[in-house]
Amino acid sequence: MKLIDGKACAASIRAQIKETVEKLEEKPALAVVLVGTDPASQIYVRNKIRACEETGIISYSYTLPETATQEQLEELLETLANDDKVTGVLLQLPLPKKFNAEAAMKKIPPQKDVDGFSAEHLGNLVLNKPGTVACTPLGVMKLLEREGVDLTGKNAVVLGRSDTVGKPMALLLLNANATVTVCHSKTVNLKEICRNADVLVVAIGRAKFVTADMVKDGAVVVDVGINRDENGKMCGDVDFDAVKDKVSLITPVPGGVGPMTIAMLMQNTLDAAKK
């Protein structure tokens, strides 16, 4: 078993970005919008701002109280969309329940959508055309590439079908010539399907859900999940200790996919500035 070191990979990507940004006369700028006081979201936003500081990207941070209206949120996003100083606009998800995230996201134009969530970017991914790709799946692809994992003809299984991770992940793997199966809560014979995977990407948000009997010997396992176990310790969607001795490559949680997500956000912001 070999650990896939997301921290080291992300650090080298951030260093390259910093080098490029230093040469630019006009620095890229990322505006991050947070609604409410969700602790996990606050941590993510802090990490994004820190990554901006490290890479030389300018960051603007906006926090709206949970008492704000949908109109106030959309007005702020529209203002940022029309601000020439701002390269990328990011709305931190999930929003508090009363907000309509889909309507809010539509206020971010595709050229400033550095999260890659817009219909236009997803459409480009379906058509295998260049465009902005969602940060987490893109980060997973960079890790696999760095480890020299050849996906051509491999059985790849994606556990989870969210619009932000599962679906774009499946499309990226498909575009890399893997044979892809997408599983979800309604999938029949889930264990058997997972056991057939050469590459297993897990993004279902259930702590330690994937056990040793679901994993093929020598498989590559990428754990996108971030949960807390019964002792309040951070863990992934994969039971790491049970699985690690069966696999050839595995991402740890923390220190696997997480750092890559933020590195890809920096990359997407830089690319948006270049365009």
Image (cartoon, helix red, strand yellow):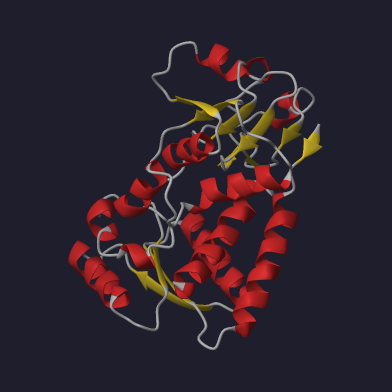
The image quadrant where one finds the C terminus is bottom left
Question: Which is nearer the eye, 257 or 225?
Answer: 257
When asked about the image quadrant of residue 215, the answer is top right
Residue at the spot 39% in from the left edge and 54% down from the top edge: 93
Q: Is residue 118 visible?
A: no
Q: Is residue 141 visible?
A: yes
Question: Which is nearer the eye, 46 or 140?
Answer: 140
Q: Position of residue 83 (x, y in %)?
A: 32, 81
Placement of 166 over or under 21, stated as above or below: above
Q: Position of residue 262 (x, y in %)?
A: 57, 59
Q: Position of residue 157 (x, y in %)?
A: 54, 26
Q: Position of residue 204 (x, y in %)?
A: 49, 33
Question: Which is nearer the eye, 25 or 229?
Answer: 25
Q: For this view, does 180 lie left or right of residue 36?
A: right
Total tally of numbered discs in the picture? 0
Q: For this view, does 4 lie left or right of residue 53?
A: right
The image quadrant where one finds the N terminus is top right
Q: For this view, does 34 lie left or right of residue 103?
A: right
Placement of 155 over or under 99, stated as above or below: above
Residue at the spot 80% in from the left edge and 36% down from the top edge: 2
Residue at the spot 42% in from the left edge and 38% down from the top edge: 167
Residue at the spot 60% in from the left edge and 45% down from the top edge: 140
